Image (spheres, rainbow, N blue to C red):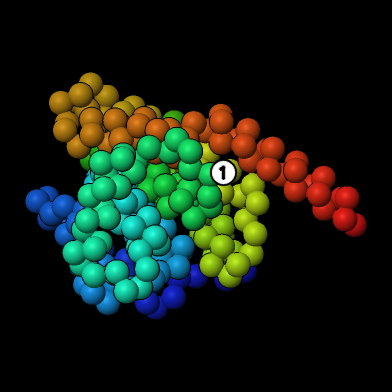
Amino acid sequence: MNLEPTTDQRLLVAALRRAATSDDVTAWDVLAAAGLTTPAMPRWGLLDWCLVLEELGAAGHDVALPLAVHAALDALPAEERTREGLLASVVERCRSDAGDATGVDTDRLLLPRAAYAIGVGRACLELAQTRAADRTISGRRLIELQGPAHRLAHAAVLLIGARIGVWRAATEHDTATPVGSWAAACAASSVEAAVTAAHELVQVHGAAGTGDRRVVALYRAAYALPRTCGSPRLMWRRAGRQWLAGSVSNHGTS
């Protein structure tokens, strides 16, 4: 399976990153930069949405609004997909707390949440790497010490593996291939990877991190992810049940 983003997807990510560089922009501003608030709003595939949610997570935006936009665009008929219709639907869905994972049992809703978790973890890891490169202990940069370097590398590998899983599941969903237990497993691994990265972020900053607003915000965002994506323990349990049910079903029909 080719998981390489298309040219359009690369342009989409670039537009999102440009829009997210300013501190005073909202998630709606970022989505507007991608063309979602125009009457000719695109019907993206699931992988496109996962790319969007990862960038919003990395930029520190709240997950509720983009999830509400995603759900609203899926639910609105083509003739109602106006800017005003989208706004009304998004407001209604945000009021119902679109960031809560309770009851989320479809791959199309769960995978973007997993992608958001990867974005949060990515931001944690990037900030931790920057701090490790700048902080010195006994005349050596922290990144040069074996312990911190190995822990940061471990967090990076977890995030890369989680991203590959999300992209694979989203690509299969876009090609109408049953995802099976993959979505729940992606949610679990993405949250675990993000929390690991957040832990390393705090470890690298030490006591100085308690006074850094960005560090505190990312740490809180990472530990709030089980509410958005579901508890990793419960997600792994769901994935196991789904895998077992599929295995039994395939065995029975073979």
Left or right: residue 243 compared with residue 118: right
Where, by quadrant of the figure, is residue 30 drawn? bottom left
Q: Secondary structure at mark 1?
A: helix
Which residue shows up at 23% across the image and 21% down it? 207
Where, by quadrant of the figure, is residue 55 drawn? bottom left
Is 197 rendered above or below residue 183? Answer: above
Could you classify mark 1 by the number of other residues whose Cα lies within 10 Å: few (under 14), some (14-19), or many (20 or more)? many
Residue that sits furthest to the top in the current view:
207
Callout count:
1
* Residue with the mark numbered 1: 184
Is 211 rendered above or below residue 74? Answer: above
Q: Quadrant of the N terminus?
A: bottom right
Left or right: residue 91 compared with residue 186: left
Which residue shows up at 56% across the image and 36% down it? 235
Between 188 and 243, the one lying in front of the other is 243
Between 56 and 31, the one lying in front of the other is 31
Residue 180, horizontal then vertical, whole percent: 65, 51
Q: Is residue 158 in view from this perspective?
A: no
Q: Amino acid at mark 1?
A: Ala
Between 205 and 116, the one lying in front of the other is 116
Residue 198, horizontal then vertical, whole percent: 36, 34
Where, by quadrant of the figure, is residue 49 drawn? bottom left
Left or right: residue 190 compared with residue 76: right
Which residue shows up at 40% across the image and 44% down it? 117
Residue 152, horizontal then vertical, whole percent: 42, 39
Which residue shows up at 58% across the image and 43% down it? 185
Q: Quadrant of the C terminus?
A: bottom right
